[in-house]
């Protein structure tokens, strides 16, 4: 944990030194970066996760076991992962009013543990005492549209609509014996959950170089056999070394709960053929470099 914080701090320090050098070389006055036409944010996120999954057997609804992957499977609650985000203000629209943001981050965790309870995962039963090798991949794609109803020189406030998807891939392998990598039986589930949220955001210019960006969104939807609740929020501080490069340090919180019930007939909402429940909470401390174009 300490090494991950040190790595994140080292990356920010490197960006700071590089930005300072660029600033001295360019020797130019700083512009207002509250409304940049295009920007790219490249960095990493130190994630702390809590994830509960239930994947039901086919044609046997709600017989799957709710599995807290950190407690039952022993995967780590923390992971350092890359993050990428791109923002664009279309020139065909009032540039101070409209913004699109596209981003992606992932969390990949694995562990090996002897089960202290029997669990049912999709169509496979993993018995008490089984040595299970688990691989949990949870990636998230997000697209945010923002409209500023207040767009002043140093203040921007508006509403935002967020859309995206959580890509969950869970693989459980029961090993023949402790310290033996040979697989006795296994099961894998892939589950894509569409998510969305609406709320408000702000952008504030605190000085020539400092900016603050808070954001808060939420939603609950129920369509056919699909139910989802989402709460997302966070804040970020930015410091610009020049008119083309800056650094960002932020914190985000996301709570996602998706339930897909077995439909009474047909394949249900969006044709999802995996039925169960995913409850996913993520806290993230992120740092990165911001490039303006």
Image: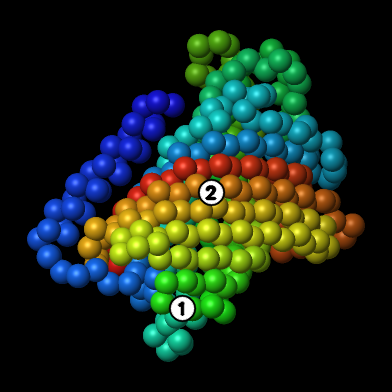
**Left or right: 183 as drawn, with respect to 266:** left
Rendering coords of residue 170 (x, y %): 60, 38
Q: Nearer the viewer, residue 182 or 224?
A: 224
Q: Residue at x 28, y 37 (%)?
A: 10
Would you name the residue on which mark 1 appears? 152
Quadrant assignment, res 119? top right
Residue depicted at 40% across the width and 65% down the height: 205
Residue 37 shown left or right of residue 144 in the figure:
left
Q: CA distance from mark 2 to mark 1?
A: 26 Å
Q: Around disc 1, counting alpha carbons within 10 Å, would you say few (fewer than 14), some (14 to 19), or many (20 or more)?
A: few
Q: Secondary structure at mark 2?
A: strand
User: What residue is disc 2 on?
Assistant: 252
Q: In the displayed image of the protein, which residue is found farthest to the top?
A: 178
Work out whether 80 lies above or below 210: above
Quadrant in the picture for the N terminus: top left
In the rendered view, how is the structure colored?
rainbow
Which residue is at a point 35% across and 38% down the rendered structure image? Answer: 8
């Amino acid at each position: 944990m300490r090494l991950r914080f040190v790595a994140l701090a080292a990356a920010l320090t490197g960006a700071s030194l590089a930005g300072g050098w660029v600033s001295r070389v360019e020797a130019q006055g700083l512009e207002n970066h509250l409304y940049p036409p295009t920007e790219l944010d490249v960095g990493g996120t130190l994630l702390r996760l809590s994830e509960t999954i239930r994947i039901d057997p086919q044609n046997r609804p709600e017989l799957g076991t709710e599995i807290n992957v950190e407690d039952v499977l022993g995967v780590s609650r923390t992971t350092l992962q890359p993050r990428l985000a791109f923002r664009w203000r279309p020139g065909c629209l009032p540039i101070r009013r409209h913004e699109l943001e596209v981003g992606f981050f992932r969390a990949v965790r694995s562990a090996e543990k002897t089960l202290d309870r029997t669990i049912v995962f999709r169509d496979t039963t993993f018995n008490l005492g089984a040595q299970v090798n688990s691989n949990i991949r949870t990636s998230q794609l997000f697209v945010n549209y923002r409209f500023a109803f207040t767009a002043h020189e140093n203040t921007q406030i508006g509403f935002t609509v967020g859309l995206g998807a959580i890509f969950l891939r869970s693989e459980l392998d029961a090993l023949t014996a402790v310290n033996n990598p040979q697989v006795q039986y296994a099961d894998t589930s892939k589950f894509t959950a569409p998510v969305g949220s609406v709320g408000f955001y702000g952008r504030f210019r605190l000085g020539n170089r400092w900016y603050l960006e808070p954001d808060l969104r939420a939603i609950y939807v129920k369509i056919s056999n699909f139910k989802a609740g989402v709460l997302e929020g966070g804040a970020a501080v930015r410091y610009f070394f020049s008119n083309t490069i800056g650094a960002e340090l932020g914190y985000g919180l996301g709570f996602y709960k998706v339930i897909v019930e077995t439909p009474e007939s047909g394949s249900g909402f969006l044709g999802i053929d995996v039925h169960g429940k995913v409850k996913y909470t993520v806290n993230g401390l992120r740092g990165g470099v911001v490039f303006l174009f």
